[in-house]
Every structure is written in structure tokens, then in C-alpha cells.
Image (cartoon, rainbow, N blue to C red):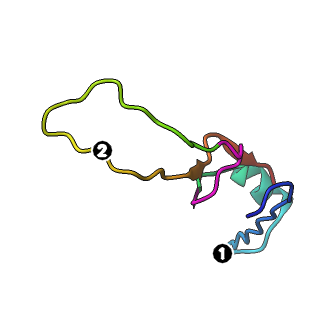
Amino acid sequence: FPGCTEQTMRAKVTLSGPCTSQIRREIGPINMTFEIPMYNVSSLQVRYLRIAENMPGYTPYRWVRYVTQSSSYVCRL
């Protein structure tokens, strides 16, 4: 995903029976949890990292894992 763009997600909710106004009230809002690997919403980047304390037997790995996670995303029907 390049910066300064808008991304869209489409989701389909399938009910086992016909959808009436009563059922819509019973369902209520939908809580969503998702993770987008290798994407950083804030566009922050780690360019330099210095380890202050060397621990014996510890070998640091030279990689950064960027991931976007939902923390509290609610979709109202």
C-alpha cells in the first residue's frame, strides 16, 4: 500500500433467515478484529536501532516486522 491512498474493505454478513428490523436490533453492532501484515498505517519507519546493553548469549536479529492491528473497531448495522 503506497502512502496517501485510501483502502476499502468489503465484508458480507449472511444470516440464516430473512432480515427484519427485529433481527437487526438483536444483532447490534459488529466488533471486528483484523491484522494487516507488512503494512504500517502511520508510515513510521525504524531506520536505526541501538541496543544499549549486551546480554551474554543474545544475538539480535536484523529485521523489523510492520503490522497493523485493529484495537477497537465497531461496525454498526
Q: Where residue 69 appears, x then y in whole percent?
A: 59, 48
Magenta segment includes 13: no
- The residue carrying mark 2 is 60
Q: Which mark is residue 16?
A: 1
- What amino acid is labelled 2 in the image? Pro
- Judge whether 28 appears above or below 39 on screen: above
- Judge whether 71 appears above or below 10 on screen: above
Residue positioned 39% across, 51% down in the render? 62
Lateral position of residue 34 relative to residue 13, left or right: left
Residue positioned 85% across, 59% down in the render? 6
Considering the image in quadrants, where does the C terminus appear? bottom right
The crowd level at tag 1 (other Cα within 10 Å; few <14, some 14-19, many 20+) is few
- Judge whether 6 appears above or below 53 on screen: below
Find out whether the residues at labels 1 and 2 contact each other: C-beta distance under 8 Å: no
Residue positioned 83% across, 64% down in the render? 20
State the extent of the magenta-drawn residues as a range: 36-44
Q: Distance between the residues labelled 1 and 2?
A: 51 Å
Q: Main secondary structure of the magenta part?
A: loop
Considering the image in quadrants, where does the N terminus appear? bottom right
**In the foreground, 52 or 77:** 52
Q: Where residue 45 appears, x then y in whole percent?
A: 62, 44
Q: Earlier in the sequence, mark 1 or mark 2?
A: 1
Disc 2 is placed on an element classified as loop
The crowd level at tag 2 (other Cα within 10 Å; few <14, some 14-19, many 20+) is few
Residue positioned 63% across, 57% down in the render? 39
